[in-house]
Image (cartoon, rainbow, N blue to C red):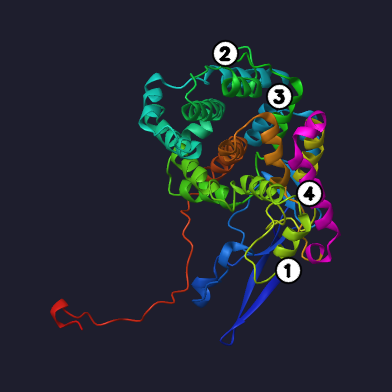
Amino acid sequence: MTITKGKKAKLTLDGQELDLDVVVGSEGEHGIDISKLRAKTGYITLDEGYGNTGSCTSDITFINGEEGILRYRGYRIEDLCEQSSFTEACYLLLHDRLPSSEQMKTFSRLLNQHSLLHEDMRHLFSAFPHDAHPMNILGTMVNAMSSFYPNVDSLSMRESIDLTAARLISKIRTIACYAHKKNTGDPIVYPQKDYNYCENFLNMMFWSPVNNYELKPDRVRALNTLLILHADHEQNCSTSTVRLVGSSQANLYASISAGISALWGPLHGGANQAVLDMLNAIQTEGGDIQRFIDRAKDKTDNFRLSGFGHRVYKNYDPRATILKKMCMNILEEEAAQQPLLDIALRLEAAVLKDEYFVSRKLYPNVDFYSGLVYMALGFPTNMFTVLFTIGRLPGWIAHWKEMVQAPAKIGRPRQIYTGKQEQQYIKIEDRG
């Protein structure tokens, strides 16, 4: 970030003129520094939903919503999905550089070494009902990790970032698979030292003593891509939650657990499941796409098309472009068994031709196709948000690390009070 010398934003309040610094990011983004506004004028800004407010500076992820650009540490998401792996993307986000061959081997080895859960943690799973949602289990178990693996504070992030991050990135995958097996009643599958991250994930999810799960390279590649696509996305709701909780100097696990809770919401990580529900509803009603489009355009109908539009992207979400191609490749052989893909393709084509949606810049987002790919890989719908969580984890850790290494300042938004003015207390016996 640089402060533009000589360029100021002028604000006039009650006859007082205030000069505010203009700040410029490395990609030319401009902002107005209002950090001294209240101290100098007594005023604050009001920006519900923070759509126009920058909460921090960050050098992790760049998004240009108008042009549909997404980069991690300067690297195009398209190149990372084409050439990289999720493990390498984790290293990149954590270290601000791609690893050397030796660094990659070391980090991968750490992921394998720390993939097992403390045996006492296994007993905690028995306390959950058999039908407990995996996201509930995930958030609870990650928070519990601070008891089994303590001292995960800002010092650990400076001195042993690889160990700390590898432990959490690896164990959260194991927790997720245990949660799934809890739901299905199948025996737990332990990670294998000869498998890479995504191979282990798929094997732990789907292998059983009576089902010798076959690891297919295209499925492993698809899971890598899905996790890379979700690895970070700037200051979204869950990432902002991780940073806000962490700003109180809460430990890493508590901060990540809070992020998991934020991601669980249907307007955030749960959106891909809503897309599948919508596609299933269209199929159930005979595949009449136009009827659902008309409902979405009807101001008297609360129905909305899931998977279209984004708070940041006002163009085609670059992640959706990648997922659409992957979805076509994976489901090509099974097209007859995947009628939802045909409905999705027809719905997208119709929306992109409709001036109502085009004028409002409502393009497909990452959630529109991710659920279809998860389904094709065999994941049940209650695991969709869990997969989002696992993918987003390295981004959360990178932001937590960036936040705790900055000068300590607890997050504390202001508000405009709109309640009652001072009231006179009346004793209970005198109240009407």
Q: Residues within 10 Å of mark 1 (few under 14, many from 20)?
A: few
In this rendering, would 394 be left or right of 62? left
Q: Nearer the viewer, mark 3 or mark 2?
A: 2
Residue annotated with mark 3? 220
Residue 356 picture location, percent across and down: 79, 66
The kind of residue tagged 4 is: Ile
Which of the labelled discs sits on residue 69, or is there none? 4
Do the CB atoms of the residues marked 3 and 1 lie less than 8 Å apart? no
In this rendering, would 120 be left or right of 208? left
Q: Residues within 10 Å of mark 4 (few under 14, many from 20)?
A: some
Residue 240 picture location, percent across and down: 55, 51
The quarter holding residue 322 reads top right
Do the CB atoms of the residues marked 3 and 4 lie less than 8 Å apart? no
Residue annotated with mark 2? 210
Question: Is residue 74 something one can see in this rendering?
Answer: no
Q: Which residues are magenta?
A: 331-358
Residue annotated with mark 1? 6
The kind of residue tagged 1 is: Gly
The kind of residue tagged 3 is: Val
What is the residue that sits farthest to the front in this orientation? 286
What is the residue that sits farthest to the bottom in this orientation? 15
Do the CB atoms of the residues marked 4 and 2 lie less than 8 Å apart? no
Do the CB atoms of the residues marked 1 and 2 lie less than 8 Å apart? no
